[in-house]
Amino acid sequence: MGSRLVPAFLIMLLLVLHGQLWFGRGNVSQVTGMKRELAELERSNREAQLRNDRVASEVNDLQEGLETVEELARQDLGMVKPNEIFVQIAQSKP
């Protein structure tokens, strides 16, 4: 009788563990769904990062563009900002 009790206990334990795998907390279908959701979130994050990089590049281009325009306006047109003093030094040619 004791020799049949051990295999029966092991089979019952296997069935309980198998049931937990398919129906318990963190079961196979939940893990599969979470993996799918994670993949979607990672894709969404990559797209958002690309958009952020593009916007940062555009901002940088605009800032550099404005600096270039300001530099040209100062050189060619004598632009002076408010509260600035413009001093021009003339060099004589020998």
Image: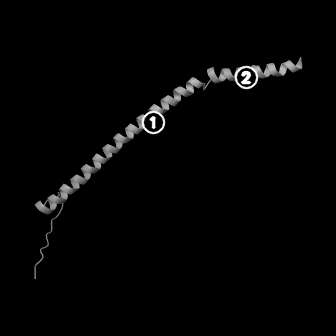
Q: Is residue 31 above or below residue 76?
A: above
Residue 25: x and y, percent? 62, 24
Q: How is the image coloured?
A: one colour
Residue at image coords 68%, 22%: 18
Q: Amino acid at mark 1?
A: Glu
Q: Secondary structure at mark 1?
A: helix
For label 2, the residue is: 14
C-alpha span from label 2 to label 1: 36 Å
The quadrant of the rendering that contains the C terminus is bottom left
Q: Residue at x 38, y 38 (%)?
A: 48
Count the marks.
2
Quickly name the residue at label 1: 42
* N-term mark: 2 or 1: 2
Q: Position of residue 56 (x, y in %)?
A: 32, 46
Q: Mark 2 is on which residue type?
A: Leu
In screen coordinates, is 9 left or right of 87?
right
Question: On the rendered structure, is 35 left or right of 55?
Answer: right
The answer to whether residue 59 is seen in the rendering is: yes
